[in-house]
Amino acid sequence: MGGDKIRVNDLLLTVPLVGGAVWPKTKGQAALQPFLVSLVVPFDVSAAAATDDLRHTINYSLLCSLLRQAFNDQTQPLGSLEDLVSGIFDALFGREDLALNEVHLKLVQPRAPLNCKSVRIEANAKRVSNSTWIVEEMRHCCEDIQCLTIVGVNDCEREERQVVRINVSIEWKQCGIQRVDFRGLTRRLHEKVGQSSFQMLEALASYVSEETLRCLVDIPHSPVVTVRAAKPVAIVFAESSEIEISRTHADFPRIFSTPVALAIGSNLGDRFYNIELALRLLEDPQSLDFKDSFVNVVDTSFMYETAPMYVTNQPSFINCACMVETNLAPIELLKLLKKIEQLVGRVPSIRNGPRAIDLDLILYGDQTIDTRTEPRKELDDLEGQLVVPHPRMFEREFVLRPLNDMVPDLVHPILYRRISDLLATLVTPPDSTPMQKVIPFPQCPPPAGRSVPSTLTHWTLRCSPGDKPGTRVMATLNTTPDSFSDGSTHNTLPAALEYAQSAVSAGAAILDVGGYSTRPGAAFVSPEEEMSRVVPSISAIRASHPQLPMSIDTFRPSVARVALAAGANCINDVYAFTGPNSFPVKAAGGAESDRYLVEMKALAREFAVPIILMHSRGDAGTNKDYSVYDYSGQQNAVVEGVRVELGAKVNSIVKGKGGVRRWLVIVDPGVGFSKTLEGNLQVLRSAASVTADVPVGQGPLRARNPLAGFPQLIGASRKSFLGAILEHTDSGRKTAPKERSWATAAAVACAVQQGALLVRVHDTQEMADVVNVANALW
């Protein structure tokens, strides 16, 4: 709104408003309220300035008289502030002699709802024709909501509540007249903030913006909510410290869908099979006579082995959690869960005793539900009843930790604390057995007549450096004639069997079988040729080593399928399910990449196999520029690139309907792929930070690292960057891949120190020795 303007500032009107007093009136009763009206009218005043003649301008005295006569004599109560806004625009644009084409209105209610200094509405309206007008922009504001809450990182700040001052602005564009229940909004924010307990003012401001948007979720227009949160007593020599943020519904996607959280556990029989079977039944409720219903698992946690709680004389549990979207009401969902428990094989037992499957409804949005007729009964006495949120979730690490994997910022609807805060403040006995992540490997192909495979074995991951079993060895079997490191060495069946036997004898945890070289300039291999290379070896090795986990190193769904049918039980994909042509990322998405993603996800889900997803940018020798990530510091740019780029792929694979279970994903930062020498060293020496729980991205895209917590594979064996390092030493020695064993040993030791789950190697016995010693050291 540029150019000349005529203003009227703070014109006092007194208008009867239904329920408009500081204290709520009886429903339908009106209260006379003061309002301050300010107008801004764009108008070229140059003619009036030149002639000093009132006829060439807008008579602002007439504007004031018009509004005072229209509203100070108002006898019919108005229902809301928005009704007053509409009435003011009707009065102004209804007078054609005023020649108003555009008006900016600010309407302030100084005697605002309780706990709020004032509320106001700002609106820009334009004349359409004659007395018709439209509102193009609108803003609702709550000024200085005073709250007493716990907020701060220092111990002293957490002992006593302090005043926090909240200002909220809700901005609409191309919207017409929008309505906000100021009284309901300010009451909600005052109560929610008062019951919260955040450490950071930033987290509190984000929470306020989310709660504000929750109040507006049913409105068709998507507003921008700006929140200012200030601590007046934070700094001795400053009036206050303050955070300002702006958010929309897009920043909180769970607002649009009710977040339903389920906790899952099993400690009898084939625990991993039981959980996968339960989830597949959950995703197909109509087959269980729940007509016209759907349940979509849209996220899963990692999987944990957990010592039993309460009743300790029983086997260890496998625990996990999932988030679902469903149209089932809470009670109906509970009925479905109980039916699934029966089908999987749960039988009556002692309270907190062993069970084949346990499905608990933990959270259903922000609803609180208690179907007990005597709510003060023992909390565990819930047979046939539903209490949500689950009354004991805050004391159970085996519930909080899996939830934290998926929704750390989700706020408990009764405790008003984030899941991450509840987990961080959970006190566990010093002699308790820590929870440990596990990865199950299925028996492939599944036995005849069973759609869900049985479990071949599972790996327990170390909780912290020094824990056993530490880093494991993946032996590399290349059945190709042109591999960069050992081409034509193991491409016959006897040689492949001999290599597999030597790998098992050396203690390799898994064998990786590949039939298509990914070295720069490698010859194209047809899917049929790739299958003919890998399937005979996999079948023969499975027959001779029935308990050995095997991964198929391929990016092709057709090859992966026949390999899994032959006995492989893991997929190792250097392109992370998006095919070789997924970089650079196309603005509109790539149809070929989408096809790879859909087919590989479906395949991994069908066979319930672990998957290894590597960071790459197409051809291994190209696309080495990571300058777009220099905002994180040049010494961290490549690591940041891996987190952002591979993280986006992992999110698309794990999250949403049809996603792969999080507990089946291993990530590979792609050492040797699309990275300079220094970039490879950067990733290798900082591998632990690739999966650290830290923020990534910048600006509005800054968010939690999508790779946080995932186990890693590091594959540096014999790669060219090691040869480049050796060549640039004083000796200047050029090396063939097979001559880089000692260099590989150094890289492997670094990977162990960085906490890698797996190292992919060629010289299995020698590198197994390196890993064993390095595991003992770190």
Image (cartoon, grey):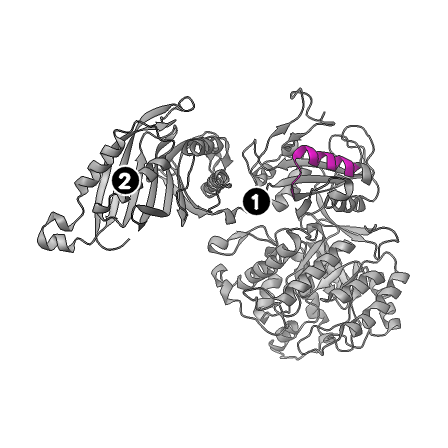
State left or right for residue 19 relative to residue 777.
left
Vertical comparison of 243 with 487: above or below: above
Name the amino acid, label 2: Ala
Asked whether the viewer can see residue 670, the reply is no
The residue closer to the viewer here, 17 or 167, is 17
Extent of the magenta region = 325-341
User: Which residue in the protein does label 1 denote?
Assistant: 254
Residue 267 position (above or below residue 691): above
Q: Position of residue 214 (x, y in %)?
A: 50, 39
Earlier in the chain: of badge 1 and badge 2, it is 2
Residue at image x 59%, y 33%?
Answer: 367
Residue that appears at 63% across and 79% down: 731
Estimate how packed mark 1 is, as few (under 14), some (14 to 19) or many (20 or more) residues with alpha carbons within 10 Å.
some
Of 197 and 212, the residue lying toward us: 212
User: Label 2 belongs to which residue?
Assistant: 91
On screen, residue 529 versus residue 720, left or right, reads right
Taking the spot 79% from the left edge, 60% from the top edge, the residue there is: 510
* Residue 646, horizontal then vertical, whole percent: 61, 60
Image mark count: 2
State the separation of the CA atoms marked 1 and 2. Answer: 42 Å
Kindly state the secondary structure of the residue where label 1 is placed. helix
